[in-house]
Amino acid sequence: LTRPVLKSSCKVGILADEMGLGKTITTLSLVLSFPKDIHYESICNDDSKRMDNYAYKTTLIIVPMALLSQWEKEFLKVVEDNKTFRCFTFYGSDSLGNLRDLLCGPDPPTVVLTTYGMVQSEWSRLNKTDSSYTNSGLFSIKFLRVILDEGHNIRNKATKTAKSIYSLKTDRKWVLTG
């Protein structure tokens, strides 16, 4: 049984529904329906076109700290026993190590969950020009997709949080709010 391939040129969007109308489930259905960059996968066998830092099978979801465990529980509930889809929480001691090796390796997680605070912290550390850090954190990777839950957290573009979010590398950006 093969899944239908989603063919859409839409790469950005805003989902602005009232609370309780299923933004999380809707978002997870997008991620699980289109879990990887099919176009890149078809050309990545050609080493000249391969990018070492492109996590083409991973979506980064950024949430407020209070929602981190809720997103993880919803992900696990949606995928049930399907071992094809995995979730990695990038927070605290789990943020140590080389993220690029994990996400650009042979078996990357489908979703990486993190918080606005972690993104801002990584961005601040990167701006202090610690050269050993530039090749291992969130900003060393181009993600398949970045999704912001409670996107109104970046409404003021002058804040460090907003600047850090704008610095993430991706071609697909989705914002959830409401």
Image (cartoon, grey):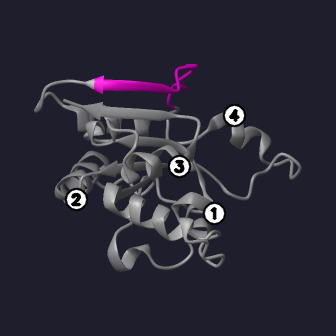
Q: Amino acid at mark 2?
A: Met
Q: Is 11 colored magenta in this rendering?
A: yes
Q: Considering the numbered disc 4 on the image, is that residue within a helix, a strand or a loop?
A: helix
Q: Amino acid at mark 3?
A: Leu
Q: Foreground: 70 or 66?
A: 66
Q: Position of residue 147 (x, y in %)?
A: 40, 41
Classify 10 Å Cα crowding around label 1: few (below 14), some (14-19), many (20 and above): few
Gap between marks 4 and 1, in whole Å? 17 Å
Q: Which residue is mark 1?
A: 106
Q: Which residue is mark 4?
A: 39
Q: Which residue is mark 3?
A: 168
Q: Amino acid at mark 1?
A: Pro
State yes or no: discs 4 and 2 in contact (Cβ < 8 Å): no
Going 39% across and 75% down the picture, which residue do you hit?
A: 94
Gap between marks 4 and 2, in whole Å? 34 Å
Q: Is residue 16 left or right of residue 139?
A: left
Quarter assignment of residue 178: top left
Residue 43, placed above or below residue 67: above
State yes or no: discs 1 and 2 in contact (Cβ < 8 Å): no
Going 51% across and 25% down the picture, which residue do you hit?
A: 4
